[in-house]
Image: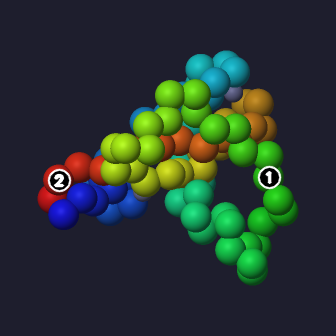
Amino acid sequence: MHVCAVCNGLRLLDARCLTCSAIAEDNGKASDWMGPYAPYEPIEVEYAANQQEAVASCRHVAYCPYCVNTFEVAVTEEMD
Ligand SMILES: [Zn+2]
Ligand SMILES: [Zn+2]
């Protein structure tokens, strides 16, 4: 079964800001932001250019504290 190592706390989100290349923070799964009762303001999400839908992936929202920028990162799920 495929699992997302980031969701399971096995490793940190390895994402870098598209603008300044700083290490971005994991703000959780992107799907958590889409719910009707999302506790966050709507955000502008930039999709990664090389997203491949064929590969099992877990989408996370990454946040750069320097640019105050949020963007979506596809984490490739690994075999358990
Ligand atoms: Zn995940
Ligand atoms: Zn940045």
Q: Position of residue 11 (x, y in %)?
A: 32, 48
Give left or right: position of 3 versus 38. Answer: left
Amino acid at pointer 2: Met
Which type of secondary structure does the marked residue at label 2 adopt? strand
> Label 2: which residue?
79
Which residue is nearer to you in this view: 12 or 1?
1
> Label 1: which residue?
43
Would you say the beta carbon of the disc 1 residue lies within 8 angstroms of ligand 2?
Answer: no
Q: Position of residue 26 (x, y in %)?
A: 54, 49
**Furthest-right residue in this view:** 41
How packed mark 1 is, by other alpha carbons closer than 10 Å (few <14, some 14-19, many 20 or more), is few
In the rendered structure, find residue 7 and report the number of the disc placed on it. none
Kindly tell me whether residue 12 is visible in this rendering: no
Amino acid at pointer 1: Ile
Residue at the image point whose x is 34% and y is 50% from the top: 56
Which residue is nearer to you in this view: 29 or 68?
29
**Furthest-top residue in this view:** 20
Which residue is nearer to you in this view: 34 or 15?
34
**Furthest-left residue in this view:** 80
Q: Earlier in the sequence, mark 1 or mark 2?
A: 1
Give left or right: position of 22 versus 46. Answer: left
How packed mark 2 is, by other alpha carbons closer than 10 Å (few <14, some 14-19, many 20 or more), is few
Give left or right: position of 20 versus 42. Answer: left
Which residue is nearer to you in this view: 23 or 46?
46
